[in-house]
Amino acid sequence: MPHYQAPLRDMQFVLHEVLNAEQHYAALPAFEDMVTKELIDQYLQAAADFCEHELSPLNSVGDREGCTWSDGVVSTPTGFKAAYQKYIELGFPSLAADPEYGGQGLPNSLGITISEMVGTANWAWSMYPGLSHGAVRTLEHHGSEQQKATYLPKLVSGEWTGTMCLTESHAGSDLGIIRTKAEPNADGSYAISGEKIFISAGEHDMSDNIIHIVLARLPNAPQGTKGISLFIVPKLIEGQANGVRCGSIEHKMGIHGNATCVINFDAAKGYLIGPEHRGLNCMFTFMNTARIGTAVQGLAAAEGSFQGALRYAKERLAMRSLSGIKAPDQDADPIIVHPAVRQMLLTQKAFAEGGRALIYDLAQYADLVEKSPDAATREKADHILSLLTPIAKAFLTETGYEAANKGVQVFGGHGFIAEHGMEQIVRDTRIACLYEGTTEIQAIDLLGRKVLGSKGKLLQDFAEVMQSFIDTQQDQANMQEFIRPLSDWMKKLGQVTKSIAQRAEQNPDEVGAAAFDYLYFAGYVTLAYYWARMAATAQHALNHGSNDTAFYQAKICTAQFYFDKLLPRVNAHIAIIDTGAESLMQLDADAFAF
């Protein structure tokens, strides 16, 4: 099983050198005298120690044992509960929460870095506290003062955990057709009845209570999404059962250590969050948090699989290098000398490190949306956050899955064997392309709602950010191999967007036909921007006499690989977009036959 080692040097490079985290926090009054480089590094080191020594050893245990269900009670794998208590003792659940309710008041962007380490070390375990963060943020934004006082202190401390209950057996991404009902009670509460499925961490033995955030319909509610309301439904109220029961847990492809539950609500007492019929709007606070968290899973898969594959490639001997023997004292050369293996390793490395830069930057934009005192800054950051969230969620999970598969491939037949742990990463990360909106749903959101729906405004705002960076590098001779293609692809993205918009005026199906490939196009260009930024930062460090030559040279080499070997994939996606919707839509549904 790959043993996780936190990539602290790379995390610090992105935070301190590329994104200037300390300056970012100093510009926000909420954090200006609080978050220093030293504080950031202290938290990173504490999280690294916890993840390497507590969580990573439990990863294979959780996969092997899974969760068990008995008469509505779920038991988690050996060691999970003890690790959660350690997590609480270290103060990680409260890191980014409001101090009024026991939180530390630190930035959510710092919490994202810790989520990356926790998720890479043990994704199934990470989902238990991970869902709680979304519940906390939903209550912070939309709960009444009484609700905040009742639920936030124990959610923030980690004594209680949270879930979000959206999906029903007949209603996945189309939440407008949910059937769960909320009947008013005389005391102002509601009786919630219905069945929700695929509820991650919906029942377990790691916390004293579970607070479910549930979508349901009030009597005579309008049809569709405009008739959905949001409710708090505790598993226990004052220590007594509340009509909430786990009917079963799913038998899944992966994430065996996390309980994915069927939850039955039988006139369970619930409390309305926010206005009636505005539940989906409130839930989007939770969903957007979860989508960024799911993007982290893509990064985690790429990083974890890369670490395992790299160690193996350095040790495994097979054949001789075609350019000459590299290990004359061995019977064969280590497989890392072979171009085919390097192609796979560098692909993993490029997706992991590029994804890290994207997610950390996305988290800083979220800080600006929440904490900037300047309205114009908040608006611009919100536009970029809105555009980049579906790209991060979908593109990074798809490339994370690709990276995980390449990890198995580096191992060859040994990768297919469970004891090495590489196939577990593939199984665990496959869900990331599905939950919180499938890749195809995210693609429609990106192209249909965010790009065309804003008449190109959101895309233009991010293009201006990229152009600003390009302008700063125009005169740097050693950056032209990155700046010229980045500029060209950015312009091409605008041209393709305009072409799709024109075709969609005649045939709306053109949007759906183009969306998947458009998302990949946008994803590759977005990651190219971050790789160019990292290359510029590395080049600057080398030009100013840094002693960490190997690290910075590796950054530049990986950027060159990305631009040479991965970015050209965009050509295929453009070609597919250009073919339009005709061949997709001309076959009658009844003509699909076996």
Image: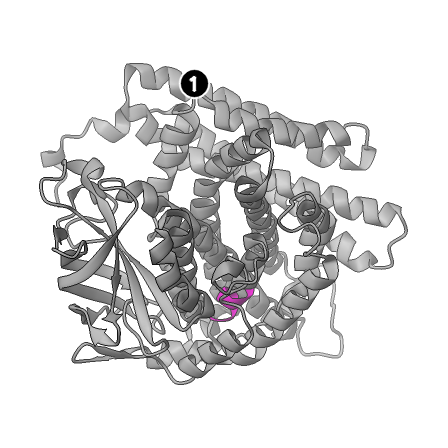
Residue 406 appearing in the image: no
In the figure, is residue 587 to the left or right of 83? Answer: left
Q: Is residue 446 magenta?
A: no
Q: Which residue is mark 1?
A: 499
Q: Position of residue 406 (x, y in %)?
A: 50, 59
Q: Which residues are magenta?
A: 117-122
Q: Is residue 577 above or below residue 392?
A: above
Q: Position of residue 363 (x, y in %)?
A: 55, 48
Give the residue displayed 10% in from the left and 44% down from the top: 219
Q: Which sits in the foreground, 194 or 197?
A: 194
Q: Main secondary structure of the magenta part?
A: helix
Q: Which sits in the foreground, 87 or 407?
A: 87
Q: Is residue 349 above or below residue 79?
A: above
- The disc labelled 1 sits on which kind of residue? Ser
Q: Quadrant of residue 35?
A: bottom right
Q: Position of residue 424 (x, y in %)?
A: 41, 70
Q: Position of residue 11 (x, y in %)?
A: 66, 58
Give the crowd class for mark 1: few <14, some 14-19, many >=20 residues within 10 Å: few
Q: Which sits in the foreground, 536 or 561?
A: 536
Give the residue displayed 45% in from the left and 65% down from the top: 156
Residue 580 appearing in the image: yes
Q: Is residue 331 above or below residue 217?
A: below
In the figure, is residue 543 to the left or right of 505? Answer: right
Q: Quadrant of residue 465?
A: top right
Q: Quadrant of residue 507?
A: top left
In the figure, is residue 321 to the left or right of 204? Answer: right
Q: Is residue 468 above or below residue 267?
A: above
**Of helix, strand and loop, which one carries label 1?**
helix
